[in-house]
Each structure stands twice: as C-alpha cells, then as structure tokens.
Amino acid sequence: MVQPEKPRSTLKTYLDILVTVRDEGRAKPTRILQRANLAYDRMDRHLQELVNKQLLEERQDGDSRYYVLTSKGLEFIENLRKTEAFVRGFGIAL
C-alpha cells in the first residue's frame, strides 16, 4: 500500500523559497509561487517571515516587487543542506 505524502514542513517550505530566489537571482512573487508550489496567502506570509529573519530582502523596481537572497539566507541554505544530509544518513527526513 502506498503511503500518502506528508505535508511539507515549514522548514522545507522556507528552503524551497530560498533556493528559488537564489536560483533566480532576483525573484518576483509570481515566480516564487510557481517554483515553490505555494498558495498566494501562504507564500506571502512565508516571504514576510523570511524578510523579518533577514534571510531575504524585499526590493521595489517601479511597481514591481522582488526578492533577493541575503548572505544570511545563503548561509541558511548551505547549513540546512548539510543538516539534511546528516539526518538522512540515519534514515530520517526533515
């Protein structure tokens, strides 16, 4: 019997958003929404949390809003990837 997939954790959602912004260089909300596979209200709430934690920076270009990764955000991605690899070695998924 196939087990249903567990919902994504907040930590994994943060990682998906941060990696999207890193890969894009500067990402508009629509692009983040698509690549991180989030509903708009959840995405908006997570983006504000990541800005408040200084992992992302919100910028304006005319009428367009976009996000860029901070050095702290890059460090977060790197350390979380290491942690994921470590716990996976014990058969545990984040």
Image (spheres, grey):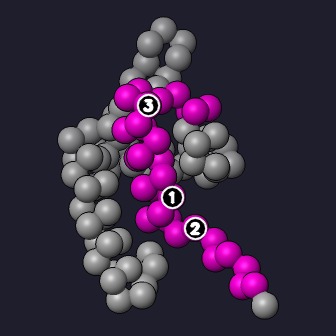
Which quadrant of the view contains residue 22? Answer: top left
- Residue 82 x/y as whole percent: 26, 67
Indicate left or right for 94 with 57 as reference: right
Q: Amino acid at mark 1?
A: Thr
Sequence-wise first label, 3 or 2:
2
- As drawn, 34 above or below 5: above
Q: Can I make out residue 48 in this image?
A: no
How far apart are the two marked residues, 3 and 2, measured between alpha carbons?
22 Å
* Crowd around label 1: few <14 · some 14–19 · many ≥20 (10 Å): some
Q: Which residue is mark 1?
A: 13
Q: Tag 2, which secondary structure?
A: loop
- As drawn, 48 above or below 5: above
Q: Tag 1, which secondary structure?
A: helix
Q: Are marks 1 and 2 in contact (CB under 8 Å)?
A: yes
Indicate left or right for 83 with 17 as reference: left
Residue 70: say if magenta: no
